[in-house]
Image (tube, rainbow, N blue to C red):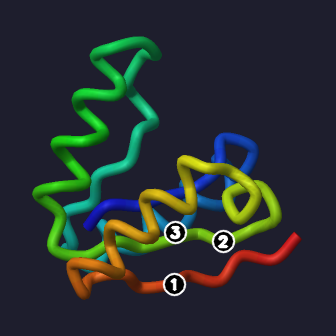
Amino acid sequence: MFVSYARGDRAPVRAIVSALTARGYSVWWDHDIAGGAAFSRELATALKSAEVLVVAWSRAPVGSAGGREECAGGRRRGGAVPGSQRQ
């Protein structure tokens, strides 16, 4: 699973990731990756190889081009699962 979220939502997303991994799912999210070219490359590779895209929607990713692009890619592949996150 690839978890798409806005940086400002990191704390609640950490709880989502913990719950998914506790249930045995393999989850990729960008919590340990530094910025720059390596970040973009790793993100693209992880997104491409993910079977499922979990989107933690809040006002932040809805308004970001990156969040919309990640979600659109997941939808095109038929693997987007919208999450629920309230602000």
Residue under label 2, please give it.
Answer: 57
Q: Tell me the residue at 30%/39% (across/down).
A: 43
**Which is nearer the N-term, disc 3 or disc 2?**
3
Q: Is 85 left, or right, of 42 in this rendering?
A: right
Dot 1: element = strand
Dot 3: element = helix
Task: Quadrant for the C terminus, please.
Answer: bottom right
Amino acid carrying label 2: it is Trp
Residue 13 vs 35, above or below: the answer is below
The picture quadrant where one finds residue 68 is bottom right
Q: Residue lying farthest right? A: 87
Q: Tell me the residue at 28%/17% (across/down).
A: 38
Amino acid carrying label 3: it is Ile
**Which is nearer the N-term, disc 1 or disc 3?**
3
Q: Nearer the viewer, residue 62 or 87?
A: 62
The label shown at residue 16 is: 3
The picture quadrant where one finds residue 86 is bottom right
User: Quick check: marks 2 and 1 in contact, CB under 8 Å?
Assistant: yes
Q: Tell me the residue at 25%/42% (across/down).
A: 44
Q: Is 17 left, or right, of 22 in this rendering?
A: right
User: Quick check: marks 1 and 3 in contact, CB under 8 Å?
Assistant: no
